[in-house]
Amino acid sequence: MDLFEAMRCTPTSRRFSDEPVATEAIEAALENARFAPSGGNRQGWRVVVVRDGGLRAKLAELYLPRWRAYTELTGAAQMLADPGSFDPVRVRMVRRADEYAERLAEVPVHLVIGVQLSDLAVTDADLPRTSIVGGASIYPFVQNLLLALRGEGLAAAMTTLLVPAEAEVRELLAIPDDVAVAAHVGVGHPAEPWPTKLARKPVAEFAFAERYGEPLA
Ligand SMILES: Cc1cc2nc3c(=O)[nH]c(=O)nc-3n(C[C@H](O)[C@H](O)[C@H](O)COP(=O)(O)O)c2cc1C
């Protein structure tokens, strides 16, 4: 598919059909995603492809309480309880995310993405703020994977709520201690048509000319 179309129309899909996902399609997506950049080209990504129903159910059990806690923390729980008082677009998203959390065990393929910690050069580790550089060597791979899955006609949702459950996820999937859990990607065939336009801010709101805040055009 066209590169720009893929970049602009790869949504977070939270509803999947029952159509089985071919192993070849997952392998083809991984085959393309591996061309992502990483610091020093260390390619520290590790992926566990989970299809087993028992393991998917256990991952879902770890996910759901963290989703519930997140909804309390962010006010999303309030949105679900009193939808009439909130922006309908946000309510729709939160409802779908809630449904996704409730039905995660049914999502046909779970990709648990890890990163080998020794492959990360975290150049902002000593700054007095939250470090973000470590993620720069794994999340380009995850985005490549989402696009590659889209290219295979597969829908996907990336989430990070299993990261706080890293110890349990490691134990469940035999992931070694020196591999950090970075993301979970639920994959399946889409139950709905692909969107033609994702809701995003215009360039003028985030890109500047020469000095922060100066209009680009
Ligand atoms: C770091 C990260 C964490 C996310 N966590 C969740 C999550 O916990 N649950 C969920 O349903 N979606 C999650 N998402 C998906 C976002 O909600 C989604 O990217 C955003 O709403 C835009 O959706 P769209 O691409 O379909 O427009 C996450 C996305 C990212 C990049």
Image (cartoon, rainbow, N blue to C red):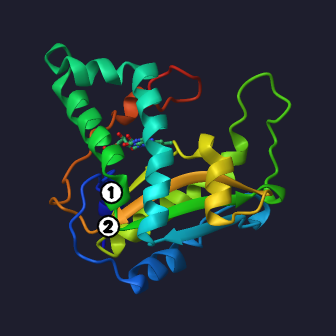
Q: Which residue is mark 1?
A: 10
Say if disc 1 is inside 8 Å of ligand 1: yes
Residue 42, visible in the rendered structure? yes
- Which residue is at 18% across, 13% downward? 85
Question: Left or right of 184: which side holds 107?
Answer: left
Instruction: Give the Cα separation between the discs numbered 1 and 2.
Output: 14 Å
Quadrant showing the N terminus: bottom left
Q: Quadrant of residue 110?
A: bottom left
Instruction: Give the residue at mark 2.
Output: 188
- Badge 2 element: strand
- Farthest residue toward the bottom? 24
The quarter of the image that holds ligand 1 is top left
Provide residue 31's location: percent of width, then percent of height: 53, 80
| Cβ–Cβ under 8 Å for marks 1 and 2 | no
Q: Is residue 54 left or right of residue 171?
A: left
Image-quadrant location for residue 90: top left
Look at the image and tell me in which quarter the C terminus lies.
Answer: top left
Compared across the picture, whether 166 is left or right of 207 comes to: right
The reply to whether residue 141 is visible in this rendering is no
